Image (tube, rainbow, N blue to C red):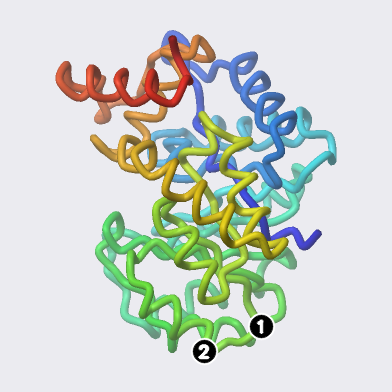
Amino acid sequence: MDMFQGSMVAIVTPFKDGKIDEAGLRGLIEFQISHGTSAIVPCGTTGESATLSHEEHDRVVKISVDSVAGRVPIIAGTGSNSTQEAINLTKHARDAGADAALLITPYYNKPTQQGLYEHYLAVAEAVDFPIVLYNVPGRTAVNMMPSTVARLAEIENIRAVKEASGSLAQVSEIISLCGSKIAVLSGDDALTLPIMSVGGKGVISVAANIVPSRMADMVNAFLYGDWEKARDLHIRLFDLFQAMFYETNPIPVKTALAMMGMIEEELRPPLCKIGAENRERLKGVLTQYGIIS
């Protein structure tokens, strides 16, 4: 199976007393692999990469590589709003034994489209390693346009794009411009099936943290041509997809994993615990899905 297809998990980084909960992370990885997840994606937005020190970032990647032990690919988040920092993080991920790197568009700086092109070109030239572009304008204040993705798709080691613009028109335009040069992955659980319907290859998923087998079933059903089953699973999972965004990701998903007894309920400031009303809503949805009793 191609490394850039299937249900991949944007895995959370569990904390305990302010530090990385290494045993907790290893447990989550085993849970994912045993339930059909096709790749592990540590140190993304869901992994709270923004508040990990470089040492912690490197450690999470290393723990992931050691725990996975080659059973599924590891696509390590290595993006930064400093191009040199992104190069350094990507080199470390490669040297640590990851299989590819996921790089968010530089946030806060608001680069132009040419600036985005030069950023990714610099990383691709500095590190001979498969790269996944990541576009999530709601978090970064910049939207990488399909024309820019098409320019980047010409670079040999740029292999995929995680699209979280929320626009099916944008995804369709990327596929129209790039054809099979680049794999398009959904960055939004609720849009996974629609994106796959226009040519996407899978998802880097938040919900897979808590329902890995159901996400894998949905994506695989579509990949193997059972569209009715894929649509049925999409509709059945829709309330859960919505629940993962009651508050800023990864607040709900970490709260859910804590309710499942898998990790401590701990987030890094400035993220904080879920509000009382949303906690009850989340509990209701998890109960409805049989995730907690």
Q: Earlier in the sequence, mark 1 or mark 2?
A: 2
The residue lying at 51 percent from left, 46 percent from top is: 233
Q: Looking at this view, is 234 or 145 the one in front?
A: 234
Q: Mark 1 sits on what residue?
A: 181
In this view, the residue in front, 158 or 7, is 7
Percent x, y for residue 257?
46, 20
Residue at the image point whose x is 48% and y is 82% from the top: 174
Which secondary structure, mark 1? loop
Left or right: 239 as drawn, with respect to 74: left
Instruction: Name the foreground residue: 34 vs 275.
Output: 34
From the viewer's perspective, is residue 1 above or below residue 34? below
Would you call the spot at circle 2 few (<14 residues within 10 Å), some (14-19), or many (20 or more)? some
* Left or right of residue 190: residue 14: right
Q: Is residue 293 visible?
A: yes
199 in relation to 1, above or below = below
Residue at screen point 28% across, 64% down: 109
How far is disc 1 from disc 2 in space, using C-alphas? 11 Å
Does residue 123 show up? no
Q: Quadrant of residue 101?
A: bottom right
Residue annotated with mark 2 = 176
Q: Quadrant of the C terminus?
A: top left
Residue 83 is situated, as x and y percent measured from the top left of the image, at 48, 64
Relative vertical location of residue 278 with respect to residue 33 in this rendering, above or below: above
